[in-house]
Amino acid sequence: MDDSPILVAGHQGLVGSAIVRRLLAGGARQLLLRTRRELDLCRQAEVERFFAEHRPHYVFLAAAKVGGIEANRSQPAQFLRDNLQIQTNVIDAAYRHGTRKLLFLGSSCIYPRLAPQPLTEDCLLTGPLEPTNEWYAIAKIAGLKMCQAYRREFGFDAICAMPTNLYGPGDNFSLTGSHVLPALIRKCHEAKLQHAEAVEVWGTGTPRREFLHVDDLADACVHLMRHYSDEAPINVGWGKDVSIAELARMVAAAVGFEGELRFDGTKPDGTPRKLLDTSRLTRLGWQPNITLQAGIESTYDWYRSHAQALRR
Ligand code: GFB
């Protein structure tokens, strides 16, 4: 793989940038990277032109419209449309232009809201989805199914990784659009600087989530690209979950915010629990490395050194 042209679609995002770091560290020499301005993956003709010209041998499909619970709730059309367009254009062009292997990134929210925990890959499509993110989930399920269909009908080597909630350097720290972990880092940091009495935490604090550092995810993606070839999706997680209240306390401690954590029950909780069963991945010889504690601390360091630029 190291001497082959590799497309990392979405290389400026949280996941794509981590995959680029991992590939460069591993010796990749021919990365194909395009900003959205240079190549709009929602536009089929542009994607077609790009693949015809560059013919990447390997594709990491990390480009997606993503966001936290509020962004998903308020922009259902964009989450459904953009994700369907991006993945359909890229998977189809990759197959038709001779890509040897493609890795599609999904999400743990594809699984039914009340499926037994930890969530195995086999519980897909066994029950209703969590309503706050069903539009995104439906798009990701369609991407997974497209990979399976192209493998069955055309013999295209497309594999699917289903990561749990991710975090790390390069995350979205916007107060309305982001996921919980970066939102809490920012809120606690700003509250500390302003000597505020309290930080608002959305929901009841009781939902449980699993958090995986994006550098661990990138390592798993490269491992799967090298060692896995099958239509079954593979969960990628840390293996343990925490309540949102516990997470908020960990973030507050890492940031040094000593005020009150105030839970706002008028905001949605989302799915009650989302812990992945990762035994399929473990059997392939991969384990995560970065603890939640260490990951929060390093992400906070990253945020502090970029806070000014991010606020602009
Ligand atoms: O990370 P998050 O937005 O997404 O929220 P989901 C997780 C939990 O944290 C919810 C609570 O119970 C939120 O109410 N929370 C507390 C907060 N304070 C905050 C805050 O300041 N900001 C945010 N964002 N949440 C997403 C899906 O679900 O998970 C996506 O919407 C995707 O589709 C992603 O699958 C991985 O974990 O609920």
Image (spheres, rainbow, N blue to C red):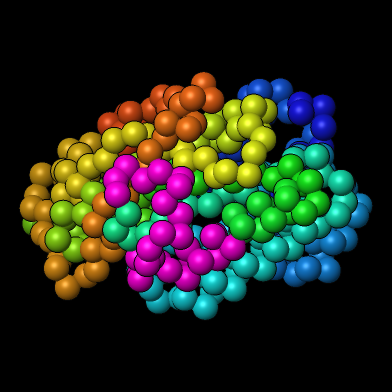
Relative placement, left or right, of 291 versus 216 is left
The N terminus lies in quadrant: top right
* Residue 301 sits above or below residue 283 on the image: below
Asked whether 299 or 197 is in front, the reply is 299
| Residue 302 occupies quadrant | top left
Give the x, y percent position of residue 255.
23, 40
Q: Is residue 150 above or below residue 142?
A: above
Magenta highlight on residue 45: no
Q: In the figure, residue 263 lies in which quadrant?
A: bottom left
Q: Is residue 158 left or right of residue 312?
A: right
Residue, x 42% and y 35% (percent of image)?
Answer: 278
| Bounds of the magenta segment | 116-142
Q: Is residue 190 visible?
A: no
The x and y percentages for residue 132 are 35, 69
Check residue 138 for magenta coloring. Answer: yes
Residue 82 coordinates in the image, percent (x, y): 60, 69
Q: Is residue 290 above or below residue 174?
A: above
